[in-house]
Image (spheres, grey):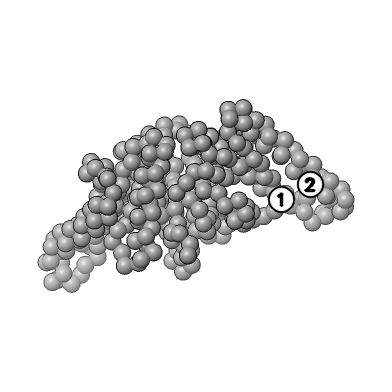
Amino acid sequence: MELNQLLVVIDPTSNDLQPSLERAVWVAKHANSAIELLLCEYNSALDGGYFFDGPAQKKARESLIENRTKWLNALAQPLRDAGIKVTLEVRWGKPLHSMILQRIEELKPDLVLRDATTHNLLQRLFFNNTSWQLIRQCPVPLWLVREGEWKGERICAAVDPVHSSDTTAALDHLLVQSTAYLAKTLGMQADYMHSYAPLPRTMIFDSELVAAYDQYVERSAKQHRGAFETLLANYPVDKANQHLLEGFPEESIPEFVSERNIDLLVMGAISRSNLENALIGNTAERILEAVQTDLLVIKPARL
């Protein structure tokens, strides 16, 4: 992972708060990064000719884009004065996630930052929320930024070393390597966690299996502990910074993040298109709704 070029998605509806830009500036100062500010604008009143004729509509749209560019320049100037290289990109179109993905393909940034927004199930499923689409499709690391005080002290990677997929195994190593790099570059304390959930006793109805349930739980814990330790054995990680959690990840991880005052949670995501994923989202999506901290989503390298 590198931090040479950052792409920051600016929210045109917020004139004051731009948490993703604040975070990008913090990263740039530590890593000497360049920043591009991307603003995507669209208004149906200026697309379709309902209220304006063709030339007037085009002029109104160009005026809006010019106004947004001036506003971005005003945001960028203090950063340039501080020695940060800042470029601007203003675009017209929809949907927003497609516009962002298009610019990512052109610019090829090392990291994309966007303000995090949480939405309920129906909004995710039917309104095509940008955050969920980016989690699924963004080909580079995606930093979803929460509002609130930023300490920038602790970073934690959530890994899943018990699997049968080579893609997932490679992703675990990428998460550990990226977290170690970020901790060193940004001056943060790094922790590494793995959360697992044994099958609940209440879901076992066979009498023989009920009798052997305690042994099953013990074997499961041993399997996950062994896989977790094997993964981290390749890296200089102190035992004090290795955390094996028992419980459903969407419950145990947010609790751990809150108790340990984690500032940035690093997770992996593998895109799927089956119905279950469309309805409930993957683990990263469910955790995004539960944690009150920044979330960095990393995908496996594309072949």
x 45%, y 57%: residue = 299
Could you say where residue 234 lies in the image, as x and y percent from the top left? 27, 52
Q: Mark 2 and mark 1 in contact? Answer it, CB < 8 Å.
A: yes
Decide if residue 271 is on the left or right side of residue 213: right
Q: Amino acid at mark 2?
A: Arg
x 78%, y 47%: residue = 61
User: In the rendered image, is residue 54 in sight?
Assistant: yes
* Residue hosting label 2: 61
User: Closest to the observer: 294 or 78?
Assistant: 78
Q: Secondary structure at mark 1?
A: strand
Could you say where residue 191 lies in the image, as x and y percent from the top left? 31, 43
x 68%, y 34%: residue = 73
Q: How many marks?
A: 2
User: In the rendered image, is residue 119 in sight?
Assistant: no
Mark 1, residues whose alpha carbon is within 10 Å: few (<14), some, or many (≥20)? some
* Residue hosting label 1: 92
Decide if residue 255 is on the left or right side of residue 112: left
**Label of residue 295 in the image:** none
User: Closest to the observer: 192 or 79?
Assistant: 79
Q: Amino acid at mark 1?
A: Trp
Mark 2, residues whose alpha carbon is within 10 Å: few (<14), some, or many (≥20)? some
Residue 172 found in image quarter: bottom left
